[in-house]
Image: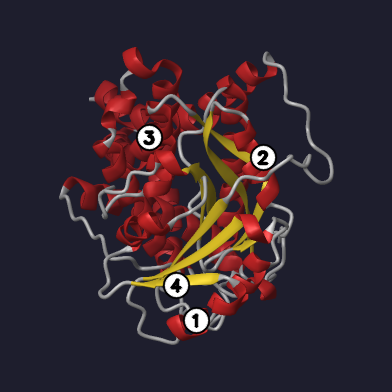
Amino acid sequence: MTALALTLIAIPVALFAYAYLGYPAILWAWAALRPRARRQHGAPAELAAWPAVSILLPAYNEERCIGATLESLLRLDYPADRRQILVVSDASTDRTDEIVRGFADRGVELLRLAKRSGKTAAENAAAPLLTGEIVVNTDASIRILPGSLKPLIRAFDDPTVGVASGRDLSVGRVDAEATRGESGYVGYEMWLRSLETRVGSIVGASGCLYAIRRGLIDHAFPAPLSRDFAAALQAREAGYRAVSVDQALCLVPRTGSLRAEFRRKVRTMARGLETLWFLRRMLDPFRYGRFAWMLASHKLCRWLVHLTLPLALVGLALLAPGSRLASVLLLLIAVVSALGVFALAWPDDRPLPRVLALPGFVVGVNVAGLAAWMKALRQERSPIWEPTRRPEVESSGVGR
């Protein structure tokens, strides 16, 4: 019985240690042995002719922020005659379409869908209208810093690059304790993608900002799946790399509450699991070698932590009658879980006490992961898009 209990505990602990510590350590050591690309300072080198780009912006009921977002896109440092901005309205029912039409004289185009179809379906519908050699994908609540587009596009000067992902900067108000943990996680993820880029290829692009060669876009990609995750996999399958560009910065406001962040994580992880299953051939080490190992390490092992975590609770419960340490650990887990549930139930219009922020984040992440697995295993696909409603970027503080 003791051996069984220890095995149950060891499974999620080993997965966590490898996914979050062991894998990055291997990447770091591997990257240290490779020559590092010379870091660019200041503006990126000017190309003789910048390639034509299409900036694709799906939107659903974004009247609150779509105007400011379009103003920021128009201010990007990129030749205006080499830039197309296309907004795809997923049958918005507010003033989104009206606001976008107000930018028509500045070159902004609008494609309105007759009925809601979801973000991926909206992107599929926009594909025939894209004119750029490179397609830049972003969201209505994101702000791309003015000097970030050129470094992102400059990555494609390397003919081996098929996808280039931006670097997310998670921002929020000073009092936004509820989702402060998300900023640390985003910073960790961006660091990991930088290491993967030095070793070879990232295994998933940022949905907030990434660019792809137009020829690599799958115009019939299944609507319930995650295109930004799949883009890196499909690029690798076509013989290209996907890279993270540290100089291509975008501001990503943290969600306003733990419950909103919880729902976002369930959606994104469930779609990620479905996407990985759809492209499971990319996990074949005999065909894709190092990339398959990186994909399994970065994505699958990390997601398996949430699925196997209940095994550790069962193992501790089996050990508790004869082990004081197991009993103490169970009690500690129970206290943290209770605080986390209390935090998730905290009213959105009241500041979350700092003592509840960390338990809320830990419990929210793990319960969301388990819920995502249940949705994926039951094949509960939902192509209809539910955009994450984020606070205005202008009211956020960078790096806080």
Q: Closer to the N terminus: mark 2 or mark 3?
A: 2
SS category of the residue bearing label 4: strand
Q: Closer to the N terminus: mark 1 or mark 4?
A: 1
Q: Are marks 1 and 4 in contact (CB under 8 Å)?
A: yes
Front in this rendered view, residue 208 or 117? 117
Q: Which amino acid, mark 4? A: Leu
Tell me residue 367's x, y (percent). 35, 54
Q: Are marks 3 and 1 in contact (CB under 8 Å)?
A: no
Residue annotated with mark 4: 110
Residue 13 in view (yes/no)? no
Q: Which amino acid, mark 1? A: Arg
Q: In which image quadrant can residue 36 be found? A: top right
Choose mark 2 or mark 3, whichever is in front.
Answer: 2
Horizontal arrangement in the rendering, residue 125 relative to residue 258 (left or right)? left
| Quadrant occupied by the N terminus | top left
Residue annotated with mark 1: 101
Q: Which amino acid, mark 2? A: Arg
Horizontal arrangement in the rendering, residue 6 relative to residue 43 (left or right)? left
Tell me the crowding category of disc 1: few under 14, some 14 to 19, or many 20 or more residues within 10 angstroms, Cα based.
some
**What's the mark number on residue 154?**
2
Residue 368 in view (yes/no)? yes
Q: CA distance from mark 1 to mark 4?
A: 7 Å
Tell me residue 100's x, y (percent). 51, 79
- For image coordinates 44% across by 72% down, the residue present is 110
Q: Closer to the N terminus: mark 1 or mark 2?
A: 1
Tell me the crowding category of disc 3: few under 14, some 14 to 19, or many 20 or more residues within 10 angstroms, Cα based.
many
Q: In which image quadrant can residue 392 be found? A: bottom right
- For image coordinates 34% across by 46% down, the residue present is 272
**What's the mark number on residue 234?**
3
Q: CA distance from mark 2 to mark 4?
A: 27 Å
Horizontal arrangement in the rendering, residue 46 relative to residue 280 (left or right)? right
